[in-house]
Image (cartoon, rainbow, N blue to C red):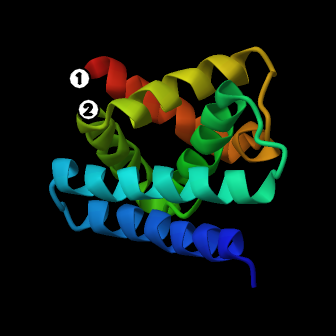
């Protein structure tokens, strides 16, 4: 297994963990540190998977898709609003996450998403809910 595969596997576990621990009311500032680790793993995985070193803007956009996709894909349907609110709270402490959510919302509105994950109706609806909670903060 390549190191990038390991990074993406760990990141998936962290994404599920952040969602799970947000249900348990862990502090958003503390969970923000885990999100920082996810962004670092995403960046490493992207760089290792793309030998030609893509442009920085592409790396940032891909990192946002990967990290935010992992955060929103494992939400329990019956606790979706609570999880979306928790992720919005984490974004309050994590500028990169907040900017990433904003960028993905704008990208999805223009049908400009790099990856299909955020374009899926359920994922898109969750992203919109998170953005709505952020705007209320």
Mark toward the viewer: 1 or 2: 2
Which residue does the numbered mark 1 point to in the structure image? Answer: 137
Q: Residue at x 22, y 68 (%)?
A: 24
Say if 118 sits above or below 76 in the image: above
Quarter of the image with the N terminus is bottom right
Give me the disc on residue 3: none
Q: Report how far apart the C-alphas of labels 1 and 2 lie in the structure.
A: 8 Å
Give residue 108's quadrant in the image: top right
Compare marks 1 and 2 and give the one earlier in the sequence: 2
- SS type, badge 1: loop
Q: Residue at x 58, y 39 (%)?
A: 64
Q: Position of residue 25 (x, y in %)?
A: 18, 60
Q: Position of residue 73 (x, y in %)?
A: 59, 58
Which residue does the numbered mark 2 point to in the structure image? Answer: 92
Q: Position of residue 61 (x, y in %)?
A: 65, 32
Q: Position of residue 26 (x, y in %)?
A: 18, 62
Please rate how many residues cluster around mark 1, counting C-alpha atoms within 10 Å: few if below 14, some from 14 to 19, many from 20. Answer: few
- SS type, badge 2: helix
Say if 118 sits above or below 27 in the image: above
Position of 102 compared to 19: left or right? right
Tell how many labels: 2
Q: Residue at x 55, y 50 (%)?
A: 67
Position of 49 compared to 127: left or right? right
Q: Nearer the viewer, residue 68 or 61?
A: 61
């Amino acid at each position: 297994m390549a190191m990038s595969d390991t990074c993406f596997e760990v990141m998936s576990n962290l994404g599920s963990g952040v969602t799970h621990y947000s249900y348990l009311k862990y502090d958003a500032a503390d969970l923000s540190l885990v999100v920082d680790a996810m962004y670092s793993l995403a960046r490493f995985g992207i760089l290792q998977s793309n030998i030609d070193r893509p442009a920085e803007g592409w790396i940032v956009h891909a990192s946002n898709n990967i990290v935010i996709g992992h955060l929103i894909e494992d939400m329990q349907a019956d606790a979706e609003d609570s999880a979306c609110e928790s992720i919005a709270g984490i974004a309050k402490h994590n500028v990169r996450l907040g900017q990433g959510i904003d960028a993905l919302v704008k990208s999805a509105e223009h049908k400009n998403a790099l990856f299909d994950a955020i374009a899926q109706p359920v994922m898109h609806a969750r992203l919109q809910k998170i953005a709505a909670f952020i705007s209320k903060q």
